[in-house]
């Protein structure tokens, strides 16, 4: 059974130290009378003398205490600022790491680093240690299909996924249409069609005024009463030609089959 430690009050300690300082009794006598070990008395006397200055000049001690407290608070503020900056930098780096692919993360591991183990490095960049030793299996057949798709695109870029699929089957590749579409998407290939968007030949100027139709209900009874003109474009082998027509409406008869 362990012996219970005796606790002495501050008043008793002070009383015995003062009695010891009077030198009327020896240290051993005082210790024996109060059932205290001489060692305890020595320690109390030493502590009392070391702090005697507090009793003589309390204002000086208080000032020193405040100065030390101020310095300590400045250090705490500096540490807090550093910790805050490190937290911001750490969050930024973690965001960048999340967007990095596996090969980039694996290249960051330094096996010769002494300050951080490989396990710690893997934890910091958030990858499994087993991935460092994993050797991916290359699908040679898939690689060959993709290569053939690229060759077909180079030869006939207007082919879509269906025609490419048919061509692959003819070339001896056993592959589905969905797989061909997926591989073309991975390779970023799209059919290049030799079709131009039709030209918009009528583009009115919004600043020009618009006039209502003036011939509606008009009775044309003589020559030179109403003339009209129009222009059109005709595509030929050599390019484009223009046809302009001018018509006197008095002599114009629509081909309605009545005459």
Image: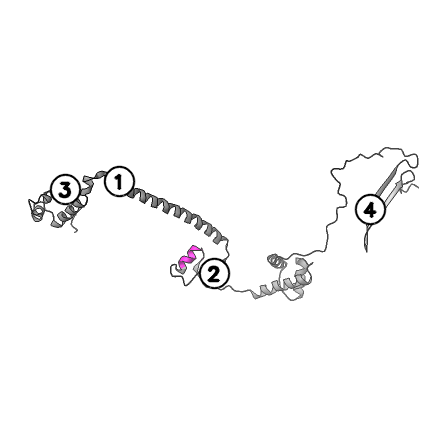
Task: Estimate the spatial distance between the alpha carbons at disc 2 and disc 4, rounded to whole Å.
Answer: 67 Å
For marks 2 and 4 on the same chain, the one whose residue lies earlier in the sequence: 2
Secondary structure mostly seen in magenta is helix
Task: Estimate the spatial distance between the alpha carbons at disc 1 and disc 3, rounded to whole Å.
Answer: 25 Å
Residue 107: which disc? 2
For marks 1 and 4 on the same chain, the one whose residue lies earlier in the sequence: 1
Q: Is residue 190 left or right of residue 203?
A: left
For marks 1 and 3 on the same chain, the one whose residue lies earlier in the sequence: 3
On the image, numbered disc 3 is attached to which residue?
14
Residue 232: which disc? 4
On the image, numbered disc 1 is attached to which residue?
63
Magenta span of residues? 119-127
Task: Estimate the spatial distance between the alpha carbons at disc 1 and disc 4, rounded to whole Å.
Answer: 102 Å
Task: Estimate the spatial distance between the alpha carbons at disc 2 and disc 1, rounded to whole Å.
Answer: 56 Å
Task: Estimate the spatial distance between the alpha carbons at disc 2 and disc 3, rounded to whole Å.
Answer: 68 Å
**How many other residues sit within 10 Å of disc 1, few (<14), some (14-19) or many (≥20)?**
few
């Amino acid at each position: 059974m362990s012996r219970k430690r005796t606790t002495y009050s501050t008043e008793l300690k002070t009383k015995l130290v003062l009695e010891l300082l009077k030198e009327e009794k020896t240290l051993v006598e005082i210790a024996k009378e109060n059932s205290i070990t001489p060692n305890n008395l020595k320690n109390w006397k030493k502590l009392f003398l070391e702090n005697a200055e507090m009793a003589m000049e309390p204002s000086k001690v208080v000032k020193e205490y405040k100065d030390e407290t101020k310095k300590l608070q400045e250090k705490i503020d500096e540490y807090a600022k550093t910790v805050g900056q490190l937290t911001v930098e750490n969050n930024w780096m973690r965001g960048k790491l999340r967007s990095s692919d596996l090969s980039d993360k694996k290249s960051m591991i330094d096996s010769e680093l002494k300050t951080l183990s490989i396990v710690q490095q893997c934890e910091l960049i958030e990858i499994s240690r087993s991935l460092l030793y994993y050797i991916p299996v290359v699908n040679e057949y898939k690689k060959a299909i993709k290569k053939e798709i690229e060759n077909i695109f180079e030869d006939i870029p207007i082919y879509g996924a269906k025609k490419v699929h048919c061509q692959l089957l003819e070339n001896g590749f056993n592959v589905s249409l969905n797989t061909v579409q997926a591989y073309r998407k991975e390779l970023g290939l799209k059919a290049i069609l030799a079709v131009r968007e039709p030209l918009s030949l009528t583009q009115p100027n919004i600043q020009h005024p618009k006039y209502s139709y003036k011939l509606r209900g008009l009775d044309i009874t003589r020559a030179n009463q109403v003339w009209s003109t129009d222009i059109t474009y005709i595509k030929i082998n050599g390019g484009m030609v223009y046809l302009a027509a001018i018509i006197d409406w008095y002599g114009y008869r629509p081909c309605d089959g009545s005459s």
